[in-house]
Image: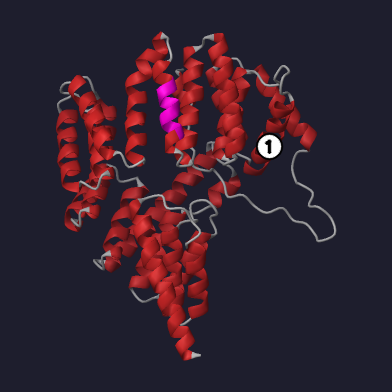
Amino acid sequence: MTTAHLRIGITALAVAYALAGTTHAAPVPSGPSDDQLKSKALKLNDLTNNDAMQDRLTELLKDNDSAKRMVKLAAGLQRDAEGKDKPFKLNATIVLAKVAHNVKDYDAAELFYDSAAQAATKLQSGSKMLLAYEGLLDLYWDQKKFKSVEDVCQKLMEAKGDELDKAKPFVLEKLVQAKAKQGDTDEALRMAEGLVNLDKGGWYFLQLKGWVQREAGKYDDAIDTYIEVLNRLENADSLKGDLKTRLKRNVNYLLSGLHVENKQIDKAAARLEGLMKDDPENPTYYNDLGFIWADHDQNLAKSEELIRKALKLDSEQRKKLLEEGKISAENAKLENAAYLDSLGWVLYKQKKFAEAVKYLEQAILDKEDGAHIEIWDHLADAYLALGETQKAIDTWQKSLKFDNTTKRDAERRKIVTQKMMKAKAAQQKKN
């Protein structure tokens, strides 16, 4: 098993729940005791290979609440050992870092990634250094600390070793993206084109060029670049079967989003319809097409049908994961917040406001994926349509507390503010 297999997505696996308590006493945590969790963390020191690390990571993330408590306690042990021998060995720190990252305890994640990087450097283990630094890159990226991403990339570019040297082109890729995210798209594009020229006829760094063009708002150029990526993938003899298919699907999906940003709704729909035909069990394609049509007041009945199919496929896939022991029963019951938002939005567009509110309120219960300005804006619109102006105003106010994750979010923030002020003015005039 390679070190890359140990990497997992950082999307949270469960919604955190509030512990019950009274005003007279501190809440008593359910589940394992603190001592049991500390012992469980220390047993991670027994892990000797990547397979065992991956298995333990998967197991720990099945219980989100216990995982949160465990990494907090483990971080306390690690900090208390300042100037002494650290309680956690290299493999344990990597697993603890990834658990902390998943449950969004970013301080603990940074502590353990740093510990892992130091230990791996001391042992001159290039593979473990990569795991630690890749984790730090992902951690800083998730927190939008793009200057820190750039700093880690620079550190990796200066590091020596065969495995590190092999990774440097991909470190450069992250460096390019970090520069673009900081607004230096001209330098990022120059660097991306340099990588394309070095990889003559290749497709990998060409897609990086397309990514930078998209980040710079050059949508026509980005579309042309990604279409060329598709052509190069098709002609890449080194790529076989399923891998080539999956890469082409990914590029077509990126193109569908670019077409939407470029106001080419019919082209976006055509890409998604092709993807649905090619991969009919993927709920994302059904949801995206349904939402795009609904958002542009097109094919509303068909949009609702597609979104409901996305929810059904997602539910079936979660049940299968539960049967395979890959997720908890609690996670198996969760419905995708984005799909619920899509359903609520298409119902709103059909003027089924009360039904829309039901699904939109369900979407925002997801404290992770439901914490998004667009979902809350949709809910506020539905409240307003039902004549519940104060609820709409309150919801808009809460939506403005969320961070922007895309340029679309920044634009929506302006629209939300305008709608909220208009609703407040109308309410004052009425009173």
In the foreground, 143 or 286: 143
Q: Where is residue 399 drawn, in percent x and y?
A: 48, 62
Q: Is disc 1 surrounded by few (<14), some (14 to 19) or many (20+) residues within 10 Å?
A: many
Who's the residue at 51% across and 90% down the image?
Answer: 431
Q: Where is residue 368 drawn, in percent x and y?
A: 52, 51
Who's the residue at 73% across and 33% down the image?
Answer: 37
Residue at mark 1: 72
For residue 186, side relative to residue 340 (left or right): left
Colour convention of the picture? secondary structure
Task: Using the rendered image of the protein, determine whether residue 412 is visible from the camera's viewpoint.
Answer: yes
Q: Which amino acid does the dot numbered 1 rest on?
A: Lys
**Residue 150 is a magenta residue:** yes
In the displayed structure, would residue 414 be above or below residue 211? below
Who's the residue at 39% across and 73% down the image?
Answer: 419
Per the rendered image, the range of residues in magenta is: 148-155
- Helix, strand or loop for the magenta stretch, by majority: helix
Task: Using the rendered image of the protein, determine whether residue 199 is visible from the camera's viewpoint.
Answer: no
**Local SS, label 1:** helix
